[in-house]
Image (spheres, rainbow, N blue to C red):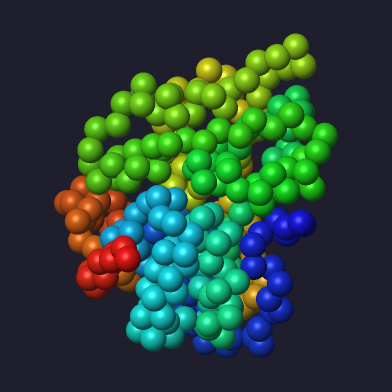
Amino acid sequence: MRFDLMAGTAAAPLAPITRAPVVLVFDSGLGGLTVLAEVRRARPDARVVYAADDAAFPYGGLAEPVLVERVLTVMERLIASHAPDLVVVACNTASTLVLPALRRRFEVPFVGTVPPIKPAAAATRSGLVSVLATPGTVRRDYTRDLIDTYAAGCSVTLVGATGLAALTEAALSGLPVSDADLWAEIGPCFVESEAGRTDVVVLACTHYPLLLARYQAVAPWPVTWIDPAPAIARRMTQLIGGPVRGLGNDGPGPVLAAFTSGDRLTPALRTALCDRGIAEVAVEAMPLVLQ
């Protein structure tokens, strides 16, 4: 099975939008904040809504049928409330499992994300590439298909980080996260062999780039870190076009954040969200009910 570099590339470009578009950025938690920043940079004129289904975080812990039904239910409410022109699914798990169902249910175009294996293979000089992902992403066939398609000439190490997304959420919520805890998650990415050593690490979860500076500090040697967010934003502009002249000249506008649970909204997290341009946070209770 062959996958395009960015999930969701089957959609054709829309007719040009001559007003400020509404863009919904969706994730299970805070990982989509990395994508949010690129979306706002690419379309500073857009009205952006950031939606975090934190009541169901982490998605990787849900059975696939439960996850599909959950995302469809949450998305139906979000689309009805915000009428987006485009939805960015800033989550690898949801992108690979739910995008087909989302496209069948809704007419709005969706842009998803997959591990950026292709640019990693182009960037490596040693031929040693590591993919830092959730255990679910590591297990899925689509990840190996991407490697076979785009990195067949590389030695690729798949690293399933069991707790890195949760550590990222904790850090943004103001809780202490030690270098030792981070190293336990990312350490297996750094491989040395007779051929050389790892020189490119793919960040295959949108949470991971939020702590990039911490990874760089504990890494045993410099590597190129590949973040999928810029490619996601480029795909968005391919579909809805670039900024409309005369709009957004003063920089990106404020963002509304919608959470499905308020459990993680500590004062430190609210400050972190404000620093990222999120001026208003709404909590719309949607507890996860497992059958």
- Give coordinates of residue 282: x percent, y percent: 24, 70
The residue most toward the right is: 153
Quadrant (top left, top right, bottom left, bottom right) of the N terminus:
bottom right
Q: Residue at x 57, y 19 (%)?
A: 221
Using the image, determine if residue 127 lies above or below residue 33.
above
Of 193 and 277, nearer the camera is: 193
Q: Is residue 162 left or right of residue 86?
A: left
Relative image position of residue 202 (x, y in whole percent): 60, 40
Which x, y percent locates residue 58? 37, 52
Q: Position of residue 89 (x, y in %)?
A: 51, 65
Front residue (pair 64, 23): 64
Residue at figure coordinates x 48%, y 60% from the top left: 64
Task: Give whichever of 143, 265 is nearer the camera.
Answer: 143
Quarter of the image for residue 204 reads: top right
* Residue 111 vertical placement versus 202 (above, below): below
The answer to whether residue 21 is above or below residue 121 is below
Left or right: residue 61 versus residue 178 is: right
Residue 69 visible at all = yes
Position of the C terminus, as image quadrant, is bottom left
Q: Residue at x 47, y 81 (%)?
A: 84
